Amino acid sequence: MDRFLYTSNKSQSLCNLWMAYPACKSFALASLGYIWLYKIADELEGINPFLINTDTEATSSKADAIAFSMSFDFDFMGVFEILEKNNIPFLQTNRDNSSPIIFAGGPVITTNPEPYKHIFDFMVIGDGETVFIKVLEILKQSFSKDKTLKELSKIEGVYVPKFNSNVKKISESFEQVIYTPIISDESYFKDTFIIEVSRGCMNRCAFCIASYLNLPFRYNSYSKIIDALELGLRYTNKIALLGAQISAHPDFDKIMKYIEAKIDSGIEIELGISSLRTDSISPELIQTLVKGGQRSSTIAIEAASDRLRNFINKNLKEEQILNAIKIARENNLKSLKIYSMIGIPTETQDDIEEFLNLAKKIKQDNKGFEITFSFSTFVPKPQTPLQWAKREDTKTLEKKQKYLEKELAKLGISSKFSSPKWDYWQTLLSRGDENLANFLIEVYKLGGKNGAYKTAFKKYQNLINSKSINGFDLNDILPWDFIENNPRKELLIKEYNRLQKYSSST
Ligand code: SF4
């Protein structure tokens, strides 16, 4: 059952808008940004939005426009699935004026829209809340497709490949709290009310788009967050606080105390927090989480050696990691996942050995406490200081994984790993250019498994820029350079150069 926390107010429909999520319904309903934009569209006079996802059968309701939200690099598969189901050509040039206008936004598009340049009619770069309303106001007009796109190209933050050669990334002033407007038992986060406490992270780890795409760090006021919390509690007892760095909120302790007081007064609250900053873990924080039913949590250390953490600007010392784990154990969390990466540029065997040294110390100090190491491989992302970096080859990464898995098992510590093969393709998608469109279509047609990527890669190899995988030079023009961003490219170069002083231990 879906419970709507707002009222849709319509007297006429000027635009049938499919709000399309390129994955299944439960993921769609769990995507806060997507559902919030649906609410905006539903509250706007003249717009008739439909929730569409890959579980939706072909619908007979005609779309005037289709908005896709893309959060993950592999989401293009879901985009094509929805278009195919509704007999809509994938490439812009194969669609005529009777086709709906098709557009997209979300982190994937904001990071690098170029692989999708020939697929979408336009894209929204940056935060969507305000731009989306301006877009919908244009879509409501009965302009021709060309005139609509021309008008859209004048909006700051909108990139219409046909008309714009540059675009400014939008950063919202963040005056309104965003929360789950439709609480659903079909959501991946079943019956959960999510509150966005803050956006971005001021720590600027050199690989991190959660930080670099969302500068400056912004947060909502204490009173607005509490009002949202009270609204959510009228519908559900499952509350989740969202933000890459929520503990940096100036009133974070006060918010946690407010929730704790509610629990102490007998109100049942199941509390979830999206991520814990290792250096912000305190006994009070863990105690509140445990009271809110949390049994396990994750900390991100990103790399095992202090040297490598300095290189990626993750200013976290080993003592802080050990201290955080001790606090988690002493305050009754049952288990902890430690997230890290391998394959970070400049990584050596010594850095890999540091994982094992750290694991030994953790094990020694925390007998009986369940620890899991979870590793992904480094994927260089556009618009970060490591956007130029080379990706380590798959075989070397697989060897490192096997070694870590074996050695951690000897210590009685379980480990999980992402697939280096998939992370390799993710690198290509992240840093691809406009020539990637046919490759993407081929991958989709061939079923989207690893073999499909290999076959499509062979077919389109001559169109694919090998630098997407092997790394760019600092003076290369990058596919996403046309985005006016904060910080500007010169500052990313400066930061990249600054980090080189940590590139070796000598
Ligand atoms: S602390 Fe986490 S969210 Fe913040 S910049 Fe580093 S990796 Fe990103």
Image (tube, rainbow, N blue to C red):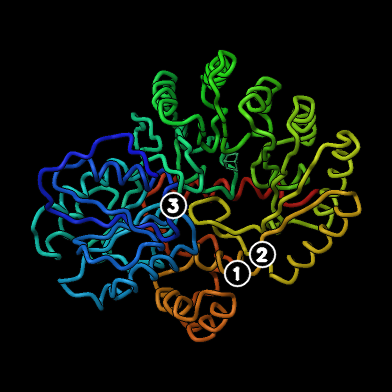
Q: Which of 504 and 197 is in front in this view?
A: 197
In percent of the image, x 41 and y 26: which residue is there?
Answer: 234
> Circle 3 is placed at which residue position?
107
The residue type indicated by label 3 comes to Pro
Nearest to viewer (mark 1 / mark 2): 2
Please report contact status of discs 3 and 2: CB closer than 8 Å, yes or no: no
Nearest to viewer (mark 3 / mark 2): 2
**Could you say which disc has been placed on residue 470 in the image?**
1
Q: Earlier in the sequence, mark 3 or mark 2?
A: 3
From the top left corner, tell me how far across and down residue 418 is, in percent.
67, 60
User: How busy is the neighbourhood of tag 3: few (under 14 within 10 Å), some, or many (20 plus)?
Assistant: many
Residue 392: quadrant of the picture: bottom right
Residue farthest toward the front in the current orientation of the protein: 1
Residue 70: quadrant of the picture: bottom left
Please report contact status of discs 1 and 2: CB closer than 8 Å, yes or no: no
Q: Can residue 228 be seen in this view?
A: yes
Q: Which of 387 and 155 is in front in this view?
A: 155
Q: Earlier in the sequence, mark 1 or mark 2?
A: 2
Q: In which quarter of the image is ligand 1?
A: top right
Say above or below: 222 vs 145: above
- Label 2 SS: loop
